[in-house]
Image: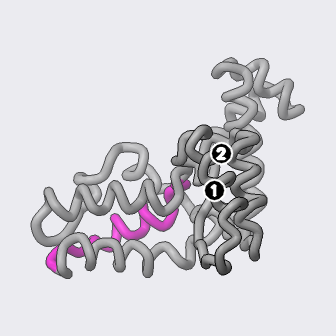
Amino acid sequence: LEAIPPNVAMALASRLSLDGVGTPRIAATFTSASGMPATPEHERLVAVLGGVQVHIPPLRERSEDIPLVASSVLRSASSGRVALSAGVMRAVVRAPWPGNILQMRSLLQGLATSVPGEIQLAHLPADIQACATRRQLTNLEHLELRAILDALKQAGGNKVVAAKIVGVSRSTLYRKLNSY
């Protein structure tokens, strides 16, 4: 739903609430990779759609699902002609995927059309390649890293200010960033 422009969301909400003919079954998603709240128009559309709302955790919190999803995306994108090396699968599982499945699908579909045979680490973007060598973070470490990255974003990249926001010393912030 977030891809629908606010004016279209409002028009659709008005149309659905006026229709009154039967009860259509509509399945939709609403995600916000940017963390921005929904617009009033989108909120109205969600309210009109009503029904059951299901919260699905982001992909980074469901790493056990990633191999199956990645394999499925590759199968459909390449008719089974392209595979992931073990190192690539490890990197894909450990990557943070802020854009969730859409981001992973975009990357893998692009690789499936440009790489014959087995996709190797060298084919991946540098930020995803780096995930292959990192250790698997615990849930607590993920939360701590997310808090640090949010603070850095809020501080415009200033590590001294970010450390104050998080409530740690600058040296602790550097140490934690290096360990993660």
Percent coordinates x, y for residue 36 in the rendering? 69, 39
Q: The residue under label 1 is which amino acid type?
A: Arg
Rendered image: mark on residue 86: none
Residue at which label 1 appears: 15
The magenta segment is 81-97
37 or 112, which lies in front?
37
At x 61% / y 39%, what residue is drawn? 6
Percent coordinates x, y for residue 47 in the rendering? 78, 59
Looking at the rendered structure, the secondary structure element under dot 1 is: helix
Percent coordinates x, y for residue 124 in the rendering? 30, 52
Query: In which quarter of the view is residue 15 placed?
Result: bottom right
Packing grade of label 2 (10 A; few <14, some 14-19, many >=20) is some
Disc nearest the viewer among 2 and 1: 1
Q: Is residue 2 left or right of residue 153?
A: left
176 or 72, which lies in front?
72
Q: Can see residue 150?
A: yes
Q: Is residue 55 magenta?
A: no
Colour scheme of the picture = one colour
- Which of pointers 2 and 1 lies earlier in the amino acid sequence? 2
Looking at the rendered structure, the secondary structure element under dot 2 is: helix
Q: Can see residue 176?
A: no
Q: Is residue 165 left or right of residue 144?
A: right
Rendered image: mark on residue 10: 2
* Distance Cα–Cα, label 2 vs label 1: 9 Å
How many tags in the picture? Answer: 2
At x 37% / y 52%, what residue is drawn? 129
Q: Is residue 96 magenta?
A: yes
At x 59% / y 66%, what residue is drawn? 28
Query: Residue 71, relative to residue 37: is it above or below?
Result: below
At x 65% / y 39%, what residue is drawn? 177
